[in-house]
Amino acid sequence: MNSAEDLVARARSGDDEAFRLFFERYARPVTSFIYDMTGEHHAAEELAQETFVRAYKSLGTFRGAGKASTWLFGIAKNVAREAIRARHRDNHHVSIDDQAVINLRGAQLTPDACFLNKELDRVIHDALRTLDEDKRLVFTLKVFQQWSYEEIAEVTGMSIPKVKTDLHRARIEMRRLMRPYMGVVR
């Protein structure tokens, strides 16, 4: 009745309320997915908005043959990749007058637990950034989004064996990178 596919089909017929429900259902997972790809909260929120704008504009491209979530996350993957490439192209220098720096001046000290969580989050996302794009994408979809190999293959266009191989290699690399922070001796 209100499956993602039904909501998209209704939105294609002009039902804006259906698209709003679709947005509400997938806004958090899409934002989380993009954050895992980019490592930046603010950028993830903006890119999630861009994902839904593109999805709305391209409702006509969804034919109902696959899952609506797969179609949406395919759009999100492309939006995140474009942002990552643009970030690498831009040699962004931070000025003392930048809003982010100004906001830091008034920041309060956080409790130890909050600090440790933020530090671990930073370490995880720094480690993710060292993975090549395919491995980061597969790792993010499988580990953080809990997608099946078939869904990952459909979104990425990779074969299932390549998905499994990239995931295996990404897990090995993440374990290696995280080992100093996890108290694992080897």
Image: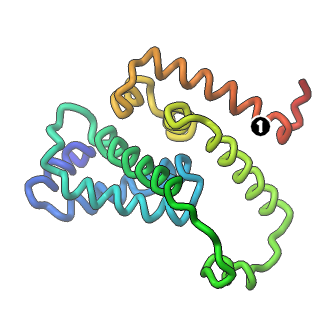
In the rendered image, which quarter is residue 183 located in? top right
- Kind of residue sitting beneath label 1: Met
Question: At which x and y percent is residue 127?
Answer: 69, 42
Looking at the image, residue 93 sits to the left or right of residue 12; the answer is right
Q: Circle 1 sits in a helix, a strand or a loop, which is it?
A: helix
**Residue that appears at 31% across and 58% down:** 52
178 to 12, vertically: above or below: above
Q: Nearer the viewer, residue 167 or 146?
A: 167
For this orientation, the residue located farthest to the left is 13
Q: Within 10 angstroms of label 1, few (less than 14), some, or many (20 or more) residues?
A: some
**Residue that appears at 56% across and 61% down:** 91
Please state, as top left, top right, bottom left or bottom right, where the C terminus lies in the image: top right
Please state, as top left, top right, bottom left or bottom right, where the N terminus lies in the image: top left
**Residue that appears at 84% across and 42% down:** 181
Question: At which x and y percent is residue 59?
Answer: 17, 51
Question: At which x and y percent is residue 155?
Answer: 35, 34
31 to 179, vertically: above or below: below
In the rendered image, which quarter is residue 139 located in? top right
Looking at the image, residue 166 sits to the left or right of residue 104; the answer is left
159 to 46, vertically: above or below: above
Q: Nearer the viewer, residue 156 or 115?
A: 156
Q: Nearer the viewer, residue 135 or 89?
A: 89
Return the residue at label 1. 178
Question: At which x and y percent is residue 73?
Answer: 37, 44
Looking at the image, residue 25 sits to the left or right of residue 143; the answer is left
What sort of colour scheme is used for the picture?
rainbow
Query: How many numbered callouts?
Result: 1
**Residue that appears at 60% across and 81% down:** 99
Looking at the image, residue 84 sits to the left or right of residue 61; the answer is right
